[in-house]
Amino acid sequence: MLKIHRTFRGKTAQDAEKGNANELLQRILIEVVTENYRQMMFEYQALEPEFKQDALTLLDPPLRANEKVISGLFSNAISRIAPRSRPEARIDRSEILIASEMANKEDDFSDGNPPEKIKHGRVDYLAWYSNRVFAIELKSAPMNCENPKATQTIKDRWRDVIQQTNGVQKHLKKLVKSDQSRYPSPISIGIMAIVGRRSINRKNESISAASEDEFIQTLVNGLKKIQMPSFQATYTFPENINKLIPRKKGRPDPKNQRLIYTPYIAFLGYSSVSPGSGPTSTK
């Protein structure tokens, strides 16, 4: 099940008339976990006749995969929620704005080409939802679910989430001045999916893991010196499909006498206009 622990606060992020950031992100996550489950069920129907009892461990749910696969899952979810959306969207500055910036530079761009940072930028997703455009940046990382710890990799990726989200927002606010109709009331959101997992022996009957609350609190405590996650949620895998065979280069490795135990995933969010966080009711 999907559980929302904290949501974005602040008037801008919760503006129902222009576009509520909490509503958008919650709807996206519902679509993400629903699609994850739907794909597992179709995969099970295809594998069960051939593998019988082993079919469940041979499943390959998208949410346990790498960032590129998870990114595709989010892309599908966003396209279902937003009337219009684009993955890997360019948010180019207008030619007039570029020319103006170049005129204020002392550098001599003799080849006529300004530096890349002036020409354009990209964002993982742009979504036009309600009366607002949302820019969404996505990262993912694994974390030991038995002894959770915010590793340096997780901290570095969270720092990237914050920096990229703020950078995109600054860029979009400049675009609003010259293209208000295309980029109305922009909000940039950063999301990091933390996959809780550990390797276990296939014959291991006793499996322990930290509680969901302990798992996400460990993350928050490890990241709050960088920036407190404003949005916090967890998704719990069904018990009968949370132990899966390891995969190498996209293929299952059934001869390996180990399983990957994935009890839950944490979703952390940061909004460029709502750095704080407030409690919400559990769903």
Image: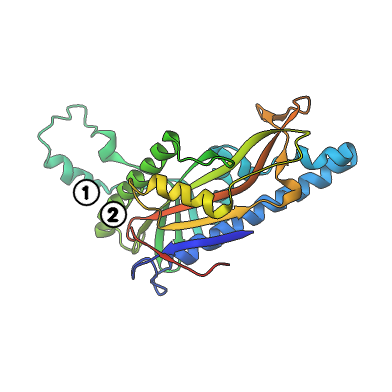
- Residue at image coords 17%, 27%: 110
Circle 2: is it few (<14), some (14-19), or many (20+) Cα within 10 Å?
many
Residue 282 lies, in percent from the top left, at 55, 67
Which of the two marks, 2 or 1, is nearer to us in this view?
2
- Residue at image coords 49%, 55%: 85
**Mark count:** 2
Report the residue that reaches farthest toward the top: 255
Q: Secondary structure at mark 2?
A: helix
Circle 1: is it few (<14), some (14-19), or many (20+) Cα within 10 Å?
some
Name the residue tied to disc 2.
175
The image quadrant that residue 182 belongs to is: bottom left
Q: Amino acid at mark 2?
A: Leu
| 93 horizontally vs 210: left or right | left
Report the residue that reaches farthest toward the bottom: 17
Q: Secondary structure at mark 1?
A: helix
Name the residue tied to disc 1.
97
Say which quadrant the N terminus sits in: bottom right
Q: Is residue 137 visible?
A: no
| 16 horizontally vs 33: left or right | left
- Residue at image coords 40%, 60%: 133
Discs 2, 1 touching: Cβ within 8 Å: yes
| Mark closer to the chain start, 2 or 1 | 1
The image quadrant that residue 202 belongs to is: top right
Q: Is residue 151 above or below residue 191?
A: above
Q: Amino acid at mark 1?
A: Leu
The image quadrant that residue 112 belongs to is: top left
Residue 100 lies, in percent from the top left, at 16, 46
Query: 147 or 36: nearer the eye?
Result: 147
C-alpha distance separating marks 2 and 1 = 9 Å
Q: Is residue 252 above or below residue 206?
A: above
Residue 8 lies, in percent from the top left, at 41, 63
Say which quadrant the C terminus sits in: bottom right
